Amino acid sequence: MKIKNLAIIIAILPITLTTAALVNAQDAFPRTPAGKPDFSGNYDISSLTPFERPASYGDRLFLTAEEVDAMRNRASSARAEGAKPSDLESGPPAKGGNIGSYNDFWFDYGTNGFAIDGKFRTSILTSPANGRMPARTAAGREKLVNAPRFAWQEREGAWWLETGDTPYDGPENMVIGVRCIYQPGASMAIRPLPYNNLKTIVQTDEYVMILIEWMHWARVIRLDSEHLPVEIRSLDGDSIAWWEQDTLVVETTNFLDAPYQPNDERRVIERFSPISDGGLLYSFTVEDPDYEEAYGGELVWPKTDERSYEYACHEGNYAMASTLMGARVREKEWREENGSAATQ
């Protein structure tokens, strides 16, 4: 999480990249003693460019100048609206109503989109051509149906006592994000999120480490290596890399979808290329049996002087205890309403 001063928050500085900048950057980019581009440093990938393309754009890859201005203005207006003080006299929300989210202070979508070859993108996803996630396979849909859910995604009452399900028996039944273990979208493949968008790279001749701010997750990538046996899996998979001229190519396999849930067919290819001002062009392709076709995209990683601090998720993780306590309250209410019929 980063705290910026007001001048930085309201600044609108375009992030652009041209093919010439990419070529010239390879000559001026800092290099390791072995002659490879040195990617070590901090990067802030926050961006107004959406991951998926709004359906109204169809297959259109680029925004017009007017649409870029509108994107910036919407973001500026949303920040101003979100920064207004809360109405202390408004009272509690209605039962079942929207209780809102964090104060706007904590969000960091950035102040601008990014451009490649001087053109602002309509989305990070570029494949499929419509810039939207492909449809799920039957197996992928089944995983989605059976995945752990937040309490507010289900019907009212202790429904699990009626169905025999056990979604709130303990921490192990909760989604890994609430358990402060792993944030998939921040880590593999990497994309901008509402906050915690800093990435730190530490590079040697044998390893590249990418520290992911959200969940404080460290991806350790082995250079010129072989993959581990398929039985050795991780939430962020097993990553190996090699150089193709000045581009670092990373291949990741051996995934877990969740603890004890392997996804042996998933494969992610990422490419890191140097650009001007010490930034990177990042592209990715994901092959996943949960989707009917592969998907991929690209975005700019601007260099930053900001630093990533400890992501103290567990220390302030009231959501876990509150969710479990709420489930116990619902169970007590259900048993009181159902009397001796309550056997669960």
Image (spheres, rainbow, N blue to C red):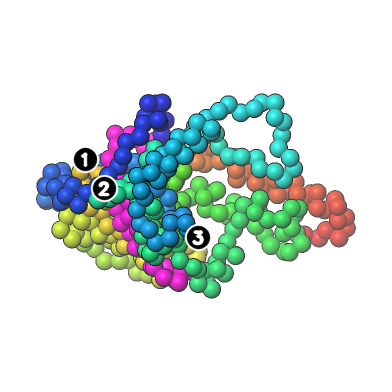
Instruction: State the residue position of label 2.
Output: 118
Q: Can you give x and y, in whole percent of width and height, for residue 310 in the image? A: 41, 37
Residue appearing at x 50%, y 41% in the figure? 313
Whether residue 71 can be seen here: yes
Label 1 Cα crowd, 10 Å radius (few <14 / some 14-19 / many 20+): few
Specify the segment rendered in magenta. 282-309
137 with respect to 2 (left or right): right
The reply to whether the C-beta atoms of the residues labelled 2 and 3 are less than 8 Å apart is no
14 with respect to 187 (left or right): left
Which label's residue is closer to the chain start, 3 or 1?
Answer: 3
Task: Judge whether 291 appears above or below 247 on screen.
Answer: below
Q: Can you give x and y, in whole percent of width and height, for residue 19 in the image? A: 20, 52
Residue appearing at x 86%, y 56% in the figure? 338
Q: Is mark 1 on a helix, strand or loop?
A: helix
187 with respect to 176 (left or right): left
Whether residue 210 can be seen here: no
Instruction: State the residue position of label 3.
Output: 259
Q: What element carries label 2?
A: loop
Number of numbered callouts drawn:
3
Say which of 156 and 169 sits in front: 156
Label 3 Cα crowd, 10 Å radius (few <14 / some 14-19 / many 20+): few
Quarter-of-image position of residue 75: top left
Q: What residue type is labelled 3?
A: Pro
The span from disc 1 to disc 2 (Cα, nearest Å) is 15 Å
Instruction: State the residue position of label 1.
Output: 277
Quarter-of-image position of residue 238: bottom left
Residue appearing at x 37%, y 26% in the figure? 7
Tell me if residue 284 is in the magenta stretch.
yes
